[in-house]
């Protein structure tokens, strides 16, 4: 099932091995084909091109569009960075999510069956792309580091990446956490409530502040990436990831199912959890 073939953040919820070392070796020797929308002026096309040009150094790369991807994706001597739409078939709410996915070529009928190397959730598919596009440089650099990490340390393939990354929580004590207000659960947006739950430094900033921090590799900044419905009707999984603006590593990852008691964003439980050092 496609859900369990994801090695990236979604697979943090699964203990099942989802990738082989052979897949990593293939990826490392292949050129990376970065798939843009057929519309070259779309938010994805513009931002992912810029992010790859500035941040990707692991392999050679070139840009193609959706139409070219359909012609080339069966070639096993090629690897791809592509944005895809997925849903979790066991979820009660049939929400669709947009993922940034690194995959090897394979002559299979469905894109979902291609051998994946790393995937990151960008946002609900119905949410405007500018909700996450300003963080793409950070995502590209993280994915690059993650792929190299598991390539150099194949024993991590069979471990739980959630445990591996969440062990970085204690290092947050030396960082400022930057969050966009809409990415915090509505009942936690008051500064007083945040400070009551978390004694570290949290700054409420604008998206461009985070974009600049990533570009400038601000060493003291960790930023929140939240995946949620943001006013759309599909209300299901809320992913919450804290990523270093300079070192591009995950300091915290979790998700919850949205409900009346658990809103769209970083909730009180998250603040409490990152307080444990």
Image (cartoon, rainbow, N blue to C red):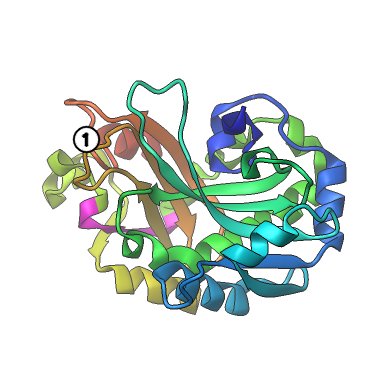
Q: Is residue 237 magenta?
A: no
Q: Residue at x 21, y 53 (%)?
A: 182
Few, some or many residues within 10 Å of mark 1 (<14, 14–19, 20+): many
Q: Nearer the viewer, residue 221 or 126?
A: 126
Q: Nearer the viewer, residue 190 or 254?
A: 254
**Relative height, residue 260 to residue 220 (above, below):** above
Secondary structure beneath dot 1 equals loop
Q: Quadrant of the C terminus?
A: top left
Q: Is residue 126 visible?
A: yes
Q: Nearer the viewer, residue 277 or 223?
A: 223
Q: Which residue is mark 1?
A: 263
Q: Quadrant of the N terminus?
A: top right
In this rendering, position of residue 29 left or right of residue 47: right
In this rendering, position of residue 215 left or right of residue 204: right
**Whole-percent x, y for residue 105 in the image:** 77, 52
Q: Quadrant of residue 177?
A: bottom left
- Magenta stretch: give its range: 174-182
**Whole-percent x, y for residue 85 in the image:** 48, 46
**Relative height, residue 7 to residue 27 (above, below):** above
**Relative height, residue 245 to residue 76 (above, below):** below
Q: Nearer the viewer, residue 63 or 204?
A: 63
Q: Residue at x 15, y 48 (%)?
A: 189
**Relative height, residue 46 to residue 110 (above, below):** below
**Whole-percent x, y for residue 42 in the image:** 41, 72
Q: Residue at x 41, y 65 (%)?
A: 133
Q: Residue at x 68, y 38 (%)?
A: 113
Q: Is residue 218 visible?
A: no
């Amino acid at each position: 099932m496609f859900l369990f073939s994801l090695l990236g953040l979604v697979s943090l919820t699964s203990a099942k091995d989802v990738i082989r070392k052979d897949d990593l070796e293939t990826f490392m020797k292949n050129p990376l084909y970065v798939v843009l929308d057929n519309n070259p002026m779309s938010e994805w096309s513009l931002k992912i091109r810029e992010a790859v040009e500035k941040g990707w150094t692991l392999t050679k790369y070139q840009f193609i569009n959706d139409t070219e991807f359909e012609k080339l994706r069966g070639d096993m001597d090629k690897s791809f960075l592509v944005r895809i739409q997925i849903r979790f078939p066991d979820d009660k709410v049939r929400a669709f999510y947009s993922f940034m996915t690194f995959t090897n070529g394979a002559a299979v009928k469905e894109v979902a069956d291609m051998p994946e190397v790393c995937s990151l959730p960008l946002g609900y598919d119905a949410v405007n792309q500018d909700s996450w596009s300003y963080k793409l440089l950070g995502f590209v650099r993280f994915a690059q580091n993650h792929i190299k990490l598991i390539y150099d340390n194949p024993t991590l393939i069979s471990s739980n990446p959630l445990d591996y990354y969440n062990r970085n929580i204690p290092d947050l004590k030396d960082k400022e956490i930057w969050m966009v207000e809409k990415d915090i659960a509505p009942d936690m947006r008051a500064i007083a409530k945040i400070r009551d739950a978390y004694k570290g430094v949290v700054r409420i900033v604008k998206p461009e502040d985070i974009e600049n921090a990533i570009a400038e590799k601000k060493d003291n900044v960790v930023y929140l990436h939240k995946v949620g419905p943001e006013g759309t009707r599909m209300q299901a999984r809320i992913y919450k990831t804290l990523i270093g603006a300079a070192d591009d590593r995950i300091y915290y990852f979790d998700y919850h199912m949205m409900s009346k008691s658990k809103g769209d964003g970083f909730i009180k439980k998250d603040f409490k959890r990152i307080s444990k050092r």
